[in-house]
Amino acid sequence: MSLRHAPTPTSMNHERHGGTNTRIAGRWLFVTRLSFVVVSIFTLLLYVIGTPVYFAYLHTLCTDCLDDRLNPDKLQALHALGISITTYAVYMVALNLLFALVYFAVAALIFWRKSDDWIAWLASFSLVAFGASFPSIPAVLAAVHPVWQLPVTLVSEDVLGFPSLVIFFFRVRTGRFVPRWTRWVAVGTAVMFVATSFLAVPFFNFSTRPGLLFLLVQLVVFGSLVFSQVYRYRHVSTPVERQQTKWIVFGVAVGLLGFLLLGVFLPAFLQVFIPLQNLDLLLVVILVTSIMFVLL
């Protein structure tokens, strides 16, 4: 039997453990720490300014809108339950702030414990950007005061949040893209979402394309993430890393499936039970919990 192409113990060990050094030192350590602090302070500023704007915004009624405001029919339904519009506004503000606070807290904890690890830095950075921009407060601030449109866009889930979160899941824990082709999925995802935010290109503007296109992009990205984790689990991961992979799969599965179930497949249920509106945000918190267990 020819052993010319048989994998040697050395090559298998390199495949399993190569590229695991994710430590940052010197000038880059200062740069990464500074970038996290700057983005965190800036997003916190958006919440300090945007929270009272969002609270006042919720007190305005609309007849045909898709945001968190009430229409006359919903307001009447709330009154039938003995809930005032101010109580509703307080509830929505508290829910949005709770979501963002959990992401901020976990990001700060990871950064405080492992700021010299660039995988941990990437996780902290993406959690701040994604967790801060996913709720409605920054978007409403930009809508009511257009001067904040560019800052909110820069620190948004499409520009910093979602692309960095995708890259993190592709590279956790070893710092490598496994399999290698997943790097192109990550790069393509980042380019597409950033272009959607800044360029008026019809191909990248999902609002002018069929909803099926956006669903297809999501399936490709999340399908690649799942395949990457399964491949890593079976062919690359150590026993400890396999346990960490289980946490990642659990967080992604429960968080995203729950979010889709409540936000997409059960919209009528949420419309009838208005007090439960936006509770799907809390399901996404499970995602950040799984990241915390993996890195700490």
Image (tube, rainbow, N blue to C red):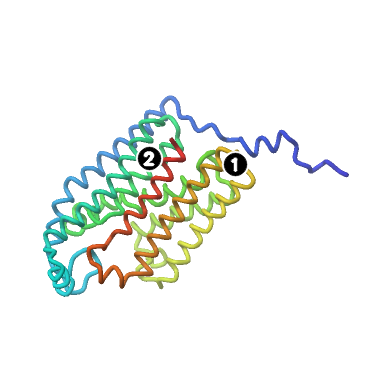
**As rendered, which of 148 and 5 lies closer to the eye?**
5
* Residue at 79% over, 43% down: 5
Image side of residue 240 versus residue 210, left or right: right
Residue 8 at what x, y percent from top left? Answer: 75, 37
Q: Quadrant of the N terminus?
A: top right
- Give amino acid for label 2: Ser
Up the image or down, 68 lies above or below 42; here it is below
List the single residue furthest toward the right: 1
List the single residue furthest toward the front: 81
Q: Residue 136's image quarter?
A: bottom left
Residue 237: mark: 1
Residue 209: mark: none
- Give amino acid for label 1: Ser
According to the picture, the residue beneath numbered tag 2 turns out to be 124
**As rendered, which of 92 and 186 lies closer to the eye?**
92
Residue 219 at what x, y percent from top left? Answer: 49, 62
Q: Quadrant of the C terminus?
A: top left
- SS at circle 2: helix
Residue 240 at what x, y percent from top left? Answer: 56, 37
Residue 19 at what x, y percent from top left? Answer: 57, 35
* Residue at 17% over, 50% down: 51
Q: Residues within 10 Å of mark 1 (few under 14, many from 20)?
A: many
